[in-house]
Amino acid sequence: MNSVRPALNRIADIVARDLEQRILEGSLKAGDRLPSERALALELNISRPSLREAIQKLVHKGLLETKHGGGTVVTDRLQASFSDPWQDMLQAHPLLQTDMLEFRHMLEGEAAKLAAERATDVDLASIDAAYAALEKAYESDDMAACIETDVAFHQAIADASHNSLIGHLWASLMRVIHGHVSDNLVHLRANSKQWSQLRAQHKAIWETVRKHEPDAAMQTSREHIDFVRQSMIEAAKVEDRRNSALRRFS
């Protein structure tokens, strides 16, 4: 009996590392439900007790959560542990928005560069689909769809960088500044010229990544963030003037 348990533990460790790698690389995302125990054990060619042991290891790490009657799902711990305190800080200290945009300038520029260098055919198919969805949303009046597809397009670029930290940090960053992204897109939508510029920037990022042009991809991505930064400054000024007018006539 004593020799069986260590063998189970070794198998469980290997399987836990495999599942953990899937979470890190993004093939298993927050909210994803694992296949049934039977199906996953067959896929991994292991016993169900070994699988349960592996899952429990990741539950203890906070990467998986077993729900009563609802299977096992991937948690958002890798994103939430970064974003939760920063959301509060950003609300309390508006000047942090500038720091966030500088960080996004570095992060997205490097993500686009690495994606242009490393993207596989599968990655490019994902980016193509995200860009097509973004273009479709641009043609509609559905701002919720515009926001969702904008975030998804940039996430596809980040995932194609094949750098786990970049992929998860980008997702975390979007959790932090989602409200600001939403407000900024609404502001840009009201100006047809700026909206056209935004579309052109996303197209340039898409094309340079598809053509595997790392330097150009970095440049187009950073120009996009510079544009976003200026737009957010202008939007803040508009909001300040509106609030000032409301105070004068209240």
Image (cartoon, rainbow, N blue to C red):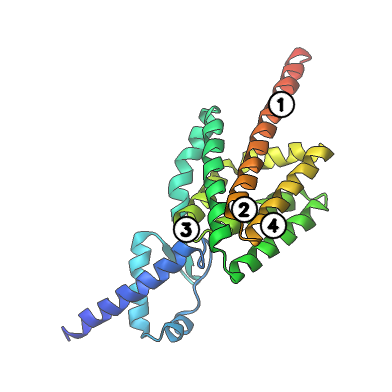
Marked residue nearer the N-terminal end (1 or 3): 3
Identify whether 144 is placed above or below 228. Answer: below
Say whether marks 4 and 2 touch (CB < 8 Å): no
Task: State the separation of the CA atoms marked 4 and 2.
Answer: 13 Å
Residue position for label 4: 207
Residue position for label 2: 154
Q: Secondary structure at mark 2?
A: helix
Tell me which amino acid carries mark 3: Asn
Q: Nearer the viewer, residue 3 or 95?
A: 95
Identify whether 9 is placed above or below 87. Answer: below
Q: Residue 91 falls in which quadrant of the image?
A: top right
Q: Secondary structure at mark 3?
A: loop
Q: At 46% across and 84% down in the image, what residue appears?
A: 43
Task: State the separation of the CA atoms marked 1 and 3.
Answer: 38 Å
Between disc 4 and disc 1, the foreground one is: 4
Residue position for label 3: 163
Q: Secondary structure at mark 1?
A: helix
Between disc 4 and disc 2, the foreground one is: 4
